[in-house]
Image (cartoon, rainbow, N blue to C red):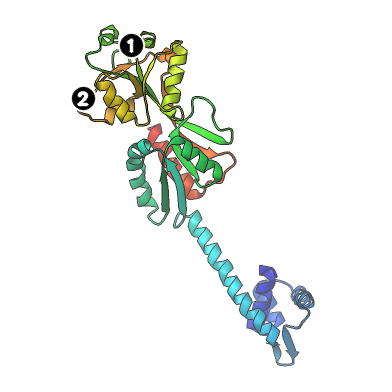
Amino acid sequence: MTSRELLYVKTIADEKSISQAAKKLFIAQPSLSQSLQRIEEQLGTQLFNRSIGGLTLTYAGERYYHIACQILKIYHDFETEISDINNLKTGRIHMGITNHLGTIVLPKILPVFKQKCPAIELHIFEGDTQMQEEKLLSGELDFAILHAPKHNAQPALLYELLTNDPFVIAIAKNHPLIEKAQKKEGYPYPVLDVKLLKNEPLIMLHKQQRIRHVTDAILAKAKISPPTALTLKNYETAQSLAGKGLGITFLPRDYADITSMECPPALLSIDEKYSPGWNMCITTLKNGFLSKADQYFLSLVREYYAN
């Protein structure tokens, strides 16, 4: 039974006449008669009693009519819902974002989005980059906002770059290497040559973390392998320990700028020749579907960072 067949039978029953039903459906009467005959043949029973007074439903016809009304209402309600989704009146977004980026991005984007789309449900998953990518690949997330990989990018994912954030060196304020840092135009802090860290103990993050990927890339470009003092998961702990002289660490400048601690480290810039940074990006599944709500949210993210 197609929706068209259901509508044909319902309209004939409502009008009690094939000719009147044909007019209402804007089709030729012989065509409608043939369609009804074909439906009854497929079912193996008559749906209408034919009499001089018009058409009346048989018992089978009454059951067909009842089911047709229910199904057509479901079709209508679904079309209305799709229209609402397309017009951003309803819908749902499953997005992912790393914990730190959530504190930066969401307060800037969500107020504007909720003002325009108050009825759109937002399901936000906060977790590390690896978990975000796994959920994108499994289809649990529509998109994620994270930092693009330096290497070993997932081939099934698209990384749309938005902004670049340079890394800085966090070092104890009394460390003698600070005197070797030089002020350079265009850098927020004095610049220290990374090669000078070749014998300095480093506080590193775990190898699966993207901050570690960037750190390893900087060290590889400088062709040095400093000793590792500690390996941690929390960049704030690494930064705090660097401030207390337990080692030196690398971290993104925007992370360093918003962190407060008892004994903050000195911050030194890294020369651009070491490509010391990472890119914030929108990450989606290749050939994945993005709803109009997804697209609108992402347009706000792009607009904000474009400005």
| Residue at 58 percent of width and 36 percent of height | 156
Residue at mark 2? 263
Q: Amino acid at mark 2?
A: Cys
Q: Nearer the viewer, residue 39 or 180?
A: 180
- Going by the image, does 20 lie left or right of 155? right
Where residue 115 appears, as percent x and y from the top left, is: 35, 51
Q: Residue furthest top?
A: 180
Q: Nearer the viewer, mark 2 or mark 1?
A: 2
Mark nearer the N terminus (2 vs 1): 1
Give the quadrant of the C terminus.
top left
Where residue 123 appears, as percent x and y from the top left, is: 42, 50
| Residue at 50 percent of width and 43 percent of height | 135
Residue at mark 1? 192
- Going by the image, does 97 lie left or right of 292? left
Residue 17, quarter of the rendered image = bottom right
User: How many discs mark residues in the rendered view?
Assistant: 2
Q: Residue furthest bottom?
A: 52
